[in-house]
Amino acid sequence: MRTDRPPSCLAPPAAVARRDTLSPIELENLNFAYPVRRVLDGVSFNVPPRTVCGLLGPNGSGKTTLFRLLATLLPAPPGAARVLGLDVAERPREVRRCLGVAFQSPALDRRLTVEENLRQHGHLYGLFGRDLSGRIARELERADLRDRAREPVGRLSGGQQRRVELAKCLLPTPRVLLLDEPGSGLDPAARLAFRGLLRGLCDEQGVTVLLTTHHLDDADACDRIVILDRGRVVDSGAPDALRAQISGECVLLRGRDLPALAARISEQLGVTAEADDGGLRIESDRGYELVARLMQRFGDRIESVTLSRPTLEDVFLRRTGHRLECDRRAEGRS
Amino acid sequence: MTSAPPAHPSAPMRSTAPPGGAKRHLVLLVLAVASLWRREVVRFLRQRSRIVGALATPIVFWLLLGSGLGRSFRAAGAPDDGTYLQYFFPGTIVMILLFSAIFSTISIIEDRREGFLQSVLVAPVPRVALVLGNVLGGTTLAAGQAAVLLSAAPWAGLSPGPAGLMAAAGWLLLIGFGLASLGFLIAWQFDSTQGFHAVMNLVLVPLWMLSGAVFPASGAPGWLQWVVALNPVSYHVAAVRRCLVPVEVARDMGLPGWPLCAAVSTGFAACLFILCVRTVEKQNASRFA
């Protein structure tokens, strides 16, 4: 984890001061409602320059809507969202010029070859000729797709298509990258490589990244996390700082007759056991000691005990009262 | 794109599209339009079934329907000296234009579903480029397919001559542009191709049937004559027919004059194209709800 980042990603409403004007992405009391339902409710946060900021939230938390607003696909309310200091509502065309956007489903033409897809995308960004060819060669190299360049995209695997999508996104050297679930469809090794790529873009080329993810390890690799739930920002900060809010370890118990067990645990050991995901979950400063005591007293009722360091999932659970799990299973849009 | 984004502290000293004058904007526009146009054509050429369909359908349709209808009925006012196959020929050309221009714009629905459209919408090109690229692509495919049938004119007993053929080709492009715009406008509203087909059958087929393509308006009841006169497609059919038959035949048939055909066809294309651009420029929250 890097420590040389600015301390907070969440802008206090009063502090719309000089520091904030330096943030490539600024959201200030952003509200948005579709005709039938309210989706974003007073969302405010900044993404400092040269950072990777992860948006964490379950389905329906408003992540994708936030993306569409920043990407100028939906009409943002004036003054609420700025990219590189440009109001998204008032200057959408200029905002688009600075953005690289990768959506959840690859936006590729399956009948065109990899190279044709990249070339087409370059044309839309005003690139052509030798400049464009050079960029295409560079991105194909970076995505390790040089030998597939002349194949129709429809013939590539899901992970390869994902890489084409990212290559396409990077082609016009955007200053701000918006990535919706960039890790989905990539195998663990490719995700690791991709995280390295993002880190390089931030450090060497000054790119700022806002991404959504439901992979906790991807979220852990971000400089900042913004936790979004039901259209509100519920917490934000560096992953380590967020995890540090939960003391000690988490103990997860599985067994029979859990509600009765929970009552007896709290009665006899004075700790709170919450029902969670078919088990009981207890936060404790001294988890290892608690495990010993639990096994001594309730060993006959317990089928398994898991002792773990707090994860971002635990932070999310603490903040919202529900798990991210649904998001992980559905892998759908939020 | 009125001015360059202000210098931002985090912005590196590189720019994707350096700001420039009107000329630069024009280059960007042409580049985007040409690229989207090319994509439509390449996609078509890579689908063998579409090519076979495009070449075979018009000829089969004209021969079967024309022969069948010609034997079955003889509409009052239909030319006596020509066969029904001759009469039906310009109507078939317009039908091919209508169907292929409108079917080619179905690609918009596929693009939306596959996500490709989103990536065009977040690119820094004016919306008019997206519409123009797609509509020109549809125009090219439609006019190309109609031209295949047009080249069969001598076998239909029509001898328009080189001037007539050139004029007809020009009309194919103008009519194709208008119909592709119509297709784009309809396709933009739909998320599935099923809804699109319903509109096709409910609106477009009657539009073609009541255009003087299948039967001449002169023999129809009074109210139907009015419908034909108010139908813009009637002027498309009349224009193509005028290109293919001698002047005196056109006069005898009571076809609308060149200026009227040109005014209606141009107005039709221009209005629909502007409507397309307006519709696409409107960011519509309900599309995502």
Image (spheres, helix red, strand yellow):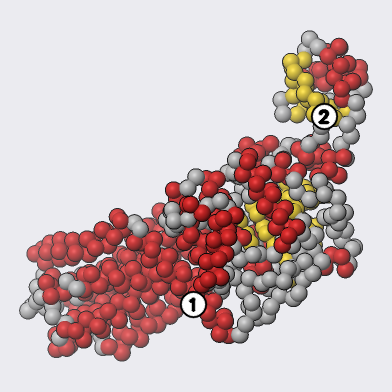
**Residue A7 occupies quadrant:** bottom right
Q: Say which element carries label 1.
A: helix
**Image spot of residue B225 (x, y percent):** 25, 77
Dot 1: within a 10 Å radius of its alpha carbon, few (fewer than 14), some, or many (20 or more) residues?
A: some
Residue A143 at least partly seen: yes
Mark 1 and mark 2 on one chain: no
Dot 2: within a 10 Å radius of its alpha carbon, few (fewer than 14), some, or many (20 or more) residues?
A: many
Q: Residue furthest top?
A: A300
Residue at 84% in and 27% down: A282
* Label 1 – label 2 distance at C-alpha: 60 Å
In the displayed structure, does residue A314 sit left or right of residue B254? right
Chain for disc number 1: B
Residue type at mark 2 is: Cys
Between B91 and A186, the one lying in front of the other is: A186
**Residue B221 occupies quadrant:** bottom left
Residue at 78% in and 50% down: A223
Return the mark for residue B30: 1
* Residue located beneath label 2 in the image: A250
**Image spot of residue A324 (x, y percent):** 71, 39
Between A245 and B27, the one lying in front of the other is: B27
In the displayed structure, does residue A328 sit left or right of residue B211? right
Q: Say which element carries label 2.
A: strand
Residue at 57% in and 55% down: A141
- Image depth: mark 1 or mark 2 in front: 1
**Image spot of residue A47 (x, y percent):** 78, 58
Residue B215 at least partly seen: no
